[in-house]
Image (cartoon, rainbow, N blue to C red):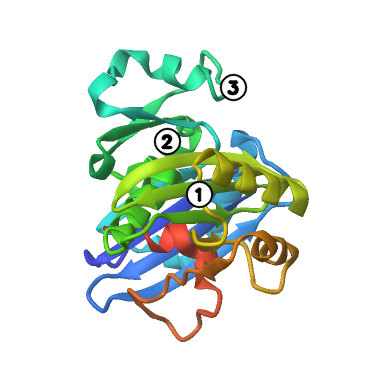
Amino acid sequence: MKHNSIKALSIQIRLSGLSFCILNRSTNTIELLDTIELDKKATPFELLNELKKAIEANAAFEQSFDSVLCIYQNELSCLVPKAVFDENSLADYLKFNAKILKSDFINYDTLASIDCMNVYVPLVNINNYVFDTFGTFDYKHSSTILIDTFSQKSSKETAKTMYINVNRSTFEIICINNSELLFYNTFEYATKEDFIYYILFTVEQLKLNPETIKTILTGQIEKDDDLYKILYTYIRFVDIEDANSYFKFDLTINTHTTYKDFIILNSFN
């Protein structure tokens, strides 16, 4: 096995699929960017099987990596202010806004930029497999990456900004003002009416003006689809944030829709 200590691997785990990204740090080049979409929400056991198949089928994963990160994207997370955080009460934080089992393993990320802890449920079987395959690795919740990334971006803004990261059946809303987190939540949707309802409800609750609030979109949304059209009907300033400004890309990678891979492309420290 050829060793290259300047390559980083990120693996994004969500119930509806998997994403993989390899960054060559010496050339600042993304060498692999791949997504597997599943037909339905998978169980942890099914996700593990899909992950094994994908890794065993691609020779790119046979090399050694200087760092490996596993990103969990699910609704099982909760922000807790650092001032009241108690490491012995992780299950208590989650049980009010997520269905958890007694057997679930719970961990947390530190969000130093907003003095919060992000409590969430990673998948133990996935963690065990990633460790057995690649050795020591780190893992985070996807919302940690989103909040950190948007907090850094908003530090250059003088006005409140609403960020919406769109997934196939869920989306996250993050509202920030000068690096201060005003709001974060995840919503499930099945129709464009569900989508716009939760957004307008959030706008109303935060007393934002739909005619002036700057709204940035990432994830699985495009300007010609129904979600964008109905959002633009009610919200005036809407834009899609690209994620490819930091890196060069291998010539085999299509970079036209890298905003769909916003989380994994912003996962490299």
Query: Three-letter amino acid code at disc 3?
Result: Lys
Neighbours of disc 1 within 10 Å: few (<14), some (14-19), many (20+): some
Q: Give the CA distance from mark 2 to mark 1.
A: 44 Å
Q: Nearer the viewer, residue 50 or 112?
A: 112
Q: Amino acid at mark 2?
A: Asn
Question: Furthest-bottom residue in view?
Answer: 251
Residue 66 picture location, percent across and down: 25, 58
Q: Earlier in the sequence, mark 3 or mark 2?
A: 3
Please tell me how crowded label 3 is: few (under 14), some (14-19), or many (20+) other residues with Cα within 10 Å.
Answer: few
Q: Nearer the viewer, residue 37 or 108?
A: 108
Check disc 2: other Cα within 10 Å, few if <14, some if 14-19, many if 20+.
Answer: few
Residue 235 appears in view: yes
Label 3 sits on residue: 99
**Cα distance between the residues tagged 1 and 3:** 31 Å
In the picture of the structure, the residue carrying the numbered disc 1 is 208
Q: Quadrant of residue 64?
A: bottom left
Residue, x 31% and y 32% (percent of image)? Answer: 117
In the visual, does 128 lie left or right of 135? right
Give the SS element for disc 1.
Answer: loop
Q: Is residue 100 above or below residue 227?
A: above
Among numbered discs 2 and 1, the one appearing first in the sequence: 2
Q: Nearer the viewer, mark 2 or mark 1?
A: 1
**Precedes in sequence: disc 1 or disc 3:** 3
Q: Disc 2 on helix, strand or loop?
A: helix
Classify the position of the C terminus by image quarter. bottom left
Q: Nearer the viewer, mark 1 or mark 3?
A: 1
Which residue is label 2 attached to?
A: 128
Give the x, y percent position of residue 32.
Answer: 45, 71
User: In the image, residue 86 lies at what x, y percent?
Assistant: 28, 17
Q: Nearer the viewer, mark 3 or mark 2?
A: 3
In this rendering, the answer to whether 133 lies above or below 233 is: above
